[in-house]
Each structure stands twice: as C-alpha cells, then as structure tokens.
Image (cartoon, rainbow, N blue to C red):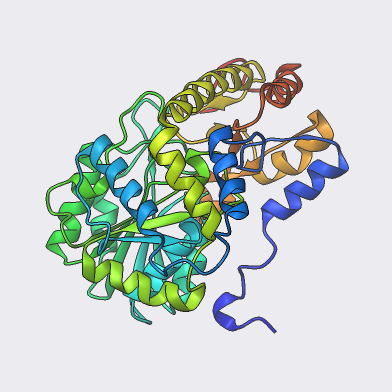
C-alpha cells in the first residue's frame, strides 16, 4: 500500500538487530541513543513548564526565548550571528528540520547529493520531496585510520539539476570530523554552482580531538546554508524531539513553510526546558563530552583486543571497525556469538562495496552497560585472521 516514493524505506537492519539483541540478551551497541538522562535542572524545567500550564500550541517558529538562546549560544561559541526573529526555526527534532528543508527548498525532479555512508533520514527526506538522491562516498585516509571528504567526486556529481548538498559533521556513522579545508571546498563548490547546503551538525558538541567547524562560518556560505542541530545529542534527550534550523531569512521562511504543515509547532514544555539547558547547562555538556571521550577510548581498546581494526573516531557516539568479513553476517552472528549487537555500515550506503566489512559500535552507554559489552567483545579474538591491531590487506 505504501506509495512508490516511500517504498524501500520500510523495515531496516536496525529493527532486525534490535530484535536479535533482545533474543540473545545482548548488550545493544547498535542503537545510537544514550541510556542515561540529561541535566537534572533541564528535566526539572520541563516538569515545571508542564505544571505551569505551558501545554498549548507554541508559535510555529518556536518560543522566542528558545530562539534567542539558540542564537546566543551559536554567537558565543562560534561568533556566528543569526537574527532569532527571522533566521531560526524550532522543529520537531533535527529530523523535521531536515525534511522541512528538503520539502521547502528542493523542487521535485531535482537532485540532492548525499555523502555516504549517510544518516538514513536523508534518503527518505529526498524521496518525500520527490527529488533524486545522488551519493558520493567518503574515502579512507592515507594512513587507513580514518575517512576524508574527497572533493573531486563531489564536484563530478554536480549537474544542472543539483539543488542541494547534505553535509553531516561530526559524521554519523564514521565519527569523522571534517576539516575547515574540506568544508570550505564544499562551500566554494556550492557558491560556484549556486547550490544550497544542508549542514547537519547535531553532534557539534561531541568532538574529542578535532575542533568542530560550522559550515556556515566559512566564506561563501552566506545565504546558501541551512544549519540543523538539536537538543537530542547535546543534552541526552533523543525522545524530546526539539531541534532547529538556522539560515538566512528566505531559507528559514521556506523551512517554516513546510514545517507549519508537517507539525505546525513543536513540544511547548520541552522548548522551555531546552532554553534553560542552553543558558545554564554548558558545564554538563562539557562533562558529557569528557565522559564520551573516555568511553570511546575504552571501546576502541576493546575492539583492538578482539582483533578488529577500529577507525579513528574524532566525534559523535560511534566508532567503526573492519570486521575482516561481511559486516552484515558479522552483525547477524555477533549477538549469539558474543552477546553484543552492532550495525553494519552497509545499511547507510547505496553502494556498499567499500563498506562491506565495516561495523558501527555505539558507545553512548552507561559504564556498567558499556563495560559489560567491552568485556564480552574483548574476551577472545573475534577475527582470528587479523590478530590484535592487524589488518587484512
Ligand atoms: C540523531 C540524528 C539526527 C536526528 O536528531 P533528532 O533531533 O532526534 O531528530 C539527525 N542527524 C543525525 C546525523 C543524527 O545522528
């Protein structure tokens, strides 16, 4: 019954892995959400807002207090100035911001370029907009330890029908943080070919070794970048669905035009609580980042001990590793074999070839859960032929 444009976006490998994890009582390192709460003051602010009767439709653009807090936070951290009245739209998670940007800014029949592996919602949003997705792949870094954005294939993928490029940095699922040079290359290309860029920066606060460069801060970005972020990953509230889009007024208006008929407005009491968090919980976010850095280091060590070959993770919740064999088979077996669940990166690609043996592990779990997962993973080599830290040529 599903319409043609949404066929193929049905049950995913995520559901299958979650089921397998449950059947084998596995530690679920497949699911990319944290299993502990955000700052107590923020949780209290949401409860207080509900009790105070902030329970009816907020303005479509979002409460002005939240929009001001979002813009102030961005100015303070990056020096980027946005007018909260005309350049900020609060959305039902980053997910709605992404869909609304596609629906409001991309004409049916035009093309949107995705960098694979990519977050699955992009492909569905492109399909909803009646556009066509074109994907280019990240490439392994010279030392084989990480991934880079190669501008040549990106440039080659641009046609006269291209409307938008989607860039996600820090990058899910690889944990790559793109450099200023890489991002400047994208913006320059977009300016040359008069393209829009959607910058998904939901992991902007979760960077460990590299600095996050907001795409909108680069020369040439003016008037062509929609930046998307969210409270979900910054404040451990993936279930609240409070996100936002920041862009020049005509772009923000287009996002709002779609948003008002998708949801009209987004969760009033949660908006109040996220405003509180942006203004008062910065120290909590710093502590989250440091905790995640430690978790990343521990899981990376465990993966080496298990004979897998982890890539560098500079940010996000995720570390990827080569399984030395089909990632899909490896992930289907892992819950029974070791009592751990993970996700094959092929699930995030159109052309799985270069990613056929890459597996994603989420480390955004409380220490007892993560430690159990780590001890199960590291208990014996998982890939005999690789040996500790080894690599199949
Ligand atoms: C989690 C995630 C989102 C969705 O964020 P919500 O605010 O929960 O809608 C968007 N993009 C990426 C890359 C994500 O990992």
At x 54% / y 43%, what residue is drawn? 45
Residue in the foreground of this view, choosing between 116 and 284: 284
At x 30% / y 65%, what residue is drawn? 164
At x 43% / y 25%, what residue is drawn? 283
Quarter occupied by residue 222? bottom left
Q: Position of residue 94 (x, y in %)?
A: 46, 56
Residue in the foreground of this view, choosing between 313 and 351: 313
Answer left or right for 50 relative to 71: right
Answer left or right for 234 relative to 178: right
Q: Judge whether 328 appears above or below 111 on screen.
A: above
Answer left or right for 235 relative to 137: right
Q: Position of residue 374 (x, y in %)?
A: 69, 21
Q: Position of residue 74 (x, y in %)?
A: 28, 43
Q: Is residue 228 visible?
A: no
Residue in the foreground of this view, choosing between 285 and 306: 285
At x 40% / y 56%, what residue is drawn? 244
């Amino acid at each position: 019954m599903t319409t043609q444009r949404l066929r193929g976006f049905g049950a995913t490998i995520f559901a299958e892995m979650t089921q397998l994890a449950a059947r084998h009582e596995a530690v679920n390192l497949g699911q990319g959400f944290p299993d502990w709460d955000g700052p107590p003051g923020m949780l209290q602010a949401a409860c207080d807002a509900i009790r105070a009767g902030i329970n009816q439709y907020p303005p479509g653009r979002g409460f002005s207090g939240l929009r001001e807090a979002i813009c102030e936070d961005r100015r303070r951290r990056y020096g980027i100035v946005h007018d909260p009245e005309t350049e900020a739209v609060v959305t039902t998670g980053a997910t709605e911001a992404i869909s609304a940007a596609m629906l409001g800014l991309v004409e049916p029949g035009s093309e949107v370029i995705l960098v694979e592996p990519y977050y699955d919602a992009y492909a569905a949003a492109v399909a909803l907009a009646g556009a066509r997705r074109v994907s280019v792949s990240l490439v392994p870094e010279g030392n084989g330890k990480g991934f880079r954005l190669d501008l040549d294939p990106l440039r080659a993928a641009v046609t006269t029908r291209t409307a938008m490029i989607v860039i996600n940095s820090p990058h899910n699922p690889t944990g790559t943080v793109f450099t200023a040079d890489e991002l400047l290359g994208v913006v320059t290309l977009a300016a040359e070919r008069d393209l829009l860029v959607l910058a998904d920066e939901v992991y902007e606060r979760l960077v460990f070794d590299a600095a996050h460069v907001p795409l909108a801060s680069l020369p040439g970005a003016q008037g062509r970048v929609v930046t998307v972020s969210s409270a979900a990953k910054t404040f451990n509230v993936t279930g609240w669905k409070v996100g936002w889009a920041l862009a020049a007024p005509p772009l923000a208006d287009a996002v709002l035009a779609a948003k008002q008929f998708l949801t009209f407005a987004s969760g009033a009491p949660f908006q109040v609580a996220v405003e509180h968090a942006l203004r008062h919980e910065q120290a909590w976010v710093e502590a989250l980042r440091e905790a995640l850095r430690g978790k990343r280091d521990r899981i990376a060590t465990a993966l080496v001990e298990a004979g897998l070959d982890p890539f560098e993770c500079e940010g996000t919740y995720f570390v990827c590793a080569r399984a030395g064999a089909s990632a899909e088979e490896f992930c289907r077996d892992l819950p029974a074999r070791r009592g751990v669940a993970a996700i094959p990166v092929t699930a995030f690609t159109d052309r799985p070839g270069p990613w056929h043996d890459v597996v994603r592990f989420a480390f955004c779990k409380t220490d007892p859960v993560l430690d159990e997962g780590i001890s199960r993973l590291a208990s014996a080599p998982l890939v005999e032929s690789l040996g500790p830290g080894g690599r199949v040529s």
